[in-house]
Image (tube, helix red, strand yellow):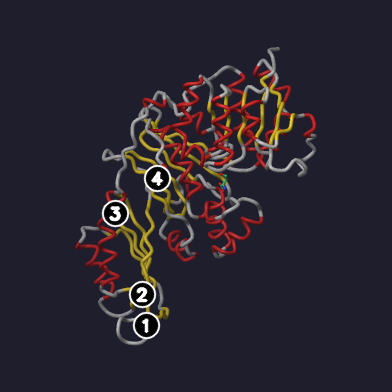
Amino acid sequence: MGKPLKIALAGLGTVGVGVLDLLRDNGALLAQRCGRPLEVVAVSARSRNKPRGDHDLSRFQWFDDPVEMARSADADVLVELIGGEDGPARAAVEAALQAGRHVVTANKALLAHHGVALARMAEEAGVALNFEAAVAGGIPIVKMMRESVAGNAVRRVYGILNGTCNYILTRMEEDGREFDDVLKEAQELGYAEADPTFDIGGFDAAHKLAILTSLAFGCEISMDDVYVEGIEDITLDDIRYARGLGYRIKLLAVAVDTGEGIEQRVHPTLVPIGSPIAEVGDVFNAVEVRGDFVDDVMLQGRGAGAHPTASSVVADIVDIARGIVLPPLGLPARQLQPFRKARMRAHEGGYYVAMDLLDQPGEVAAVARAFADEGISIESIVQKGRSIARVVPLREGEVERETAPFILITHDTQEAAMRVALARIVEEGHCVGTPRMIRIERFR
Ligand code: HSE
């Protein structure tokens, strides 16, 4: 048996305790697999006295300051589970790399904003910077991108990268409950981030996507170039109409090289019922990669939670114990290409549109004309019974108008054309309020 790999653990929240559980429960197995024991020697957290399962922290050297621990603990590896793009997490990771220690982190925000600089530091120090747990929790997608599909030119990667949103959309569809009601439940169950806008606004998924994009296309990470829309405006009606048309709504994160550049986008998306991604429900995450030789490979699993996330953290530690050190972003950081952004206006795909259309002769024809004039071909139309909507015309007082929910989906078209057509429909006063537009992925 070789000498122990010594670990300093910064952050003893849910995942930190999950890592301690795993290292304890599977310690003998891990020692066998690595040829050496994995030993936590030092820990740091905000509070020393909070209960941490049945773990006795007095066995470890305690540090109030994670940066001091990263700098001076007698450890080979810093495991950073503090979170946050800057502050103590970043300072601790930088201190560890400067001290020539390997780093394992679950911190997606840190990597999305500073990943390239940190990868350079790690490469210069000749140490590992591993982050499997930062993207889709327990799913080994980083290893798959960095190693298993390394022989392929990647064409696209997409996935469900936020369990909270997937849970909310699944429960809305299956239980017929409204968004706010299910969000509250997700928070009570502990799925949502401390600030739920991070989840439901799509930013959590955007962080993860920015990292995947770099691994997929060998480009620099560019969080600022992710187009982000959250699920806050999705209604139960949208979910029901979409289902009637053969689709399910998911918060999808997509990165694709269009030839013009790379589209990085996170937004609610209609996916065909029956496609593998449409069947991924509740808190589950899934990622699908298309490589030029392997074709499509999909991984599905738990994207959050103490033990699934700990599984990824420990897999990263195992690599280090085995002496495996790879360029963090799949190729040397200095060889990463600058990010080339494809404009969303040039995006091509299908669209779902829902609006409250005035219920009077000629309105459907006017809407059809607006689409036809932009060269947009309509695939299906649904018009439901009447409802009353309040409208405020420019000069007269407030009036009530009869409207009817009007839903359509288009064949593939350009986003710029859709925006022009919808602006015209609003400007000409054919509908009340703003039409809702949701993109469709047909996975061809
Ligand atoms: N809050 C995230 C989610 C988990 O709901 O998927 C951690 O990334």
Q: Mark 2 points at which residue?
A: 432
Do callouts 2 and 1 mark residues in contact (Cβ within 8 Å)? yes
Q: How far apart are marks 4 and 1 (CA)?
A: 42 Å
Give the camera-side residue of 296 and 70.
Answer: 70
Residue at (52% x, 40% y) in the render? 108
Nearest to the eye among marks 4 and 2: give it. Answer: 4
| Three-letter code for the amino acid on which mark 2 is drawn | Val
Within 10 angstroms of label 4, few (less than 14), some, or many (20 or more) residues?
A: few
| Three-letter code for the amino acid on which mark 1 is drawn | Arg
Name above or below for residue 30 compared with residue 301: above
Residue at (29% x, 54% y) in the render? 415
| Three-letter code for the amino acid on which mark 4 is drawn | Asp
Give the camera-side residue of 293 and 246.
Answer: 293
Q: Using the rendered view, name the quadrant where residue 358 is placed.
A: bottom left
Which mark is first along the chain, 3 or 1? 1
Q: Which residue lies furthest to the top in this view?
A: 1
Q: Name the residue under label 4.
A: 224
Q: Distance between the residues labelled 2 and 1?
A: 9 Å
Which mark is first along the chain, 2 or 4? 4
| SS assignment at label 2 | strand
Within 10 angstroms of label 1, few (less than 14), some, or many (20 or more) residues?
A: some
The numbered dot on residue 415 is: 3
Report the side of 413 relative to 136 (left or right): left
The numbered dot on residue 401 is: 1
The numbered dot on residue 93 is: none
Do callouts 4 and 2 mark residues in contact (Cβ within 8 Å)? no
Do callouts 4 and 1 mark residues in contact (Cβ within 8 Å)? no
Name above or below for residue 236 compared with residue 61: below
Which mark is first along the chain, 1 or 2? 1
What is the x, y in percent for residue 236?
A: 50, 64
Do callouts 4 and 3 mark residues in contact (Cβ within 8 Å)? no
Name above or below for residue 96 compared with residue 135: above
